[in-house]
Image: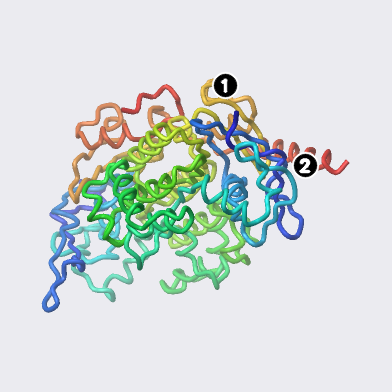
Amino acid sequence: MSYLTTKDLTVRLRNGAPLLRKVSLAVKSGEVRALVGESGAGKSMIGKAVLGILPRAAKLTGGEILLDGEDLLTLPPKQRRAKIGAKVALIPQDPLTALNPSRRVGPQITDRLVDILGWKRKEAEDRAVELLDEVHIQSPERVMRSYPHELSGGMRQRILIASAFAAEPKLIIADEPTTALDVTVQKQILKLIREMQERHDTALLFVTHDLGVVSKISQSLTVLYAGKVIEETDVRTFFAAPKHAYSRALLAATPKYTDPDGSLMPVPDSIISEVEQEVAAFDAQLKR
Amino acid sequence: MSDLIYRVKDLRVSFPDLSRKPLFGAAPRIDVLKGLSFDVAKGDVLGIVGGSGSGKSTLGRAMIRLLRPDSGSILFEGTEIAELNEDELRPLRKQFQMIFQDPMSSLNPRRRVGGIIAGPLRLQGFDNIPSRVDEALEMVGLAKRFSERYPHELSGGQRQRVGIARAIALKPDFILADEIVSGLDVSSQAQVLNLLEQLVRELGLTLAFVSHDLSVIRRLCTRIFVLQKGEIVENAPTAELFDNPKSAYTRALLDAIPLPDPDQVWS
């Protein structure tokens, strides 16, 4: 049974322009699903809709978000927030802007446990030390007392991972957590996320534009274009033979250093217009 | 050889370590580049690769004298530029240009694209500026009407093209491109890389391309420097570096690249 299911999720700008077009997807506990697409495809918007943190200009206009079988959108706002706070966590893209620069790291991890789950400060601190140890940070007590600027990018991302897992969430949304990191650190962080996710049997929704990363982290993926699901499959099937022409074009645009010619094909205009037509046809069908 | 564009000897750059500055007196220095020596031939496309903090951007910035080196010699087209001051550098600046990582913060949000590209041309006393602006836009594949737009009206890939147009409008001999595709998605990344490849061919540019990702530069670069902790640990022609990486650090960088292949072993 899937932990997170979205059914026909539709998000529009206040002026009516669609951002997500009836997106249906599911993530099981212990599963990693990647959301793939170019910038503006709506991949981050799905995570934001689930977390209930859509930007002011956007509005959820239809569909269901089922968390453990319960439709979040039918819950009263207070209960909805409590449920999301207890069960869902976010690993954000930029570890520097996600941490408050004027506060020590420790309280930023424990806040969530104390404020949302009502733990005692001391308990929360012990848990934070445990978690920092789990994400392979040496001398966690010292790091708890550090300010974010004293730590490297990789360290900061480890702290955010620790803080995401702190309250034992059932679902984690990772929004391009490694794009700000260099390749060697990216590798460590991806492995760490995978390790933590397996150990805690968490459902993980992993937003990225890098198909190389997808092949390393996830079991299944959803390809989006203009807020519409273009292809949805498991990773092995996808990399063996992507079904949709747009998916094939995305794969062709992904660099492969093992290829001596190494030519990179941008997604051709013909395929863009093909997929644009498909989206338009989909919109027309909805209106009828 | 006479067709060298750069001849660099024992280049050293250090920065003050402000986190360890005593209350009185000068801060201790951190050595960022530890005595680099290398040549760059005309027409080369040089890849400068390394992890964060390896000194790759510092090296690029020292080569176009956005930084003053502590010591060492930088011969650019036979002219010693390591010790020149700003006034002496200005006439040379049109020969070496830079394309920045983040086009949003390196394009003035209050100026139109046309004005952004014209700025350096005006500073360098070029004539026929409007036609040069149009020509530069055309070379990067943007229509003339883009000169009326503001940066926020453009996509990431288009903004990066404007950055490229601003650099090539001056017809420089050398361009430094610092991580210029790392903020773009794969399709725009492929477009920008293909564009650079075409410009190098058409304009006979010498280019230095700074990146942390070896996979994007295999096609573009003819020679690669791998930097680690301020030292060049490997300097090899591209094919040689990929087929037979000599340094352990180069191998680690290659192994860390996630290939779009679920069967790749990622130990």
Q: Is B9 situated above or below A171? A: below
> Label 2 is placed on what type of residue?
Ala
Residue receiving disc 2: A280
x, y percentage for residue A2? 59, 31
Between residue B184 and residue B7, name the one nearer to us: B184
Task: Compare marks 2 and 1 and give the one earlier in the sequence.
Answer: 1
x, y percentage for residue A4? 60, 37
Residue receiving disc 1: A241
Q: Would residue B190 be seen by someone viewing this image from the given angle? A: no
> Label 1 is placed on what type of residue?
Ala
Mark 2: secondary structure: helix
Q: Quadrant of residue B135?
A: bottom right
Left or right side of A285 for A111: left
Between residue B129 and residue A77, name the one nearer to us: A77
x, y percentage for residue B98? 38, 59
Say how the picture is coloured.
Answer: rainbow
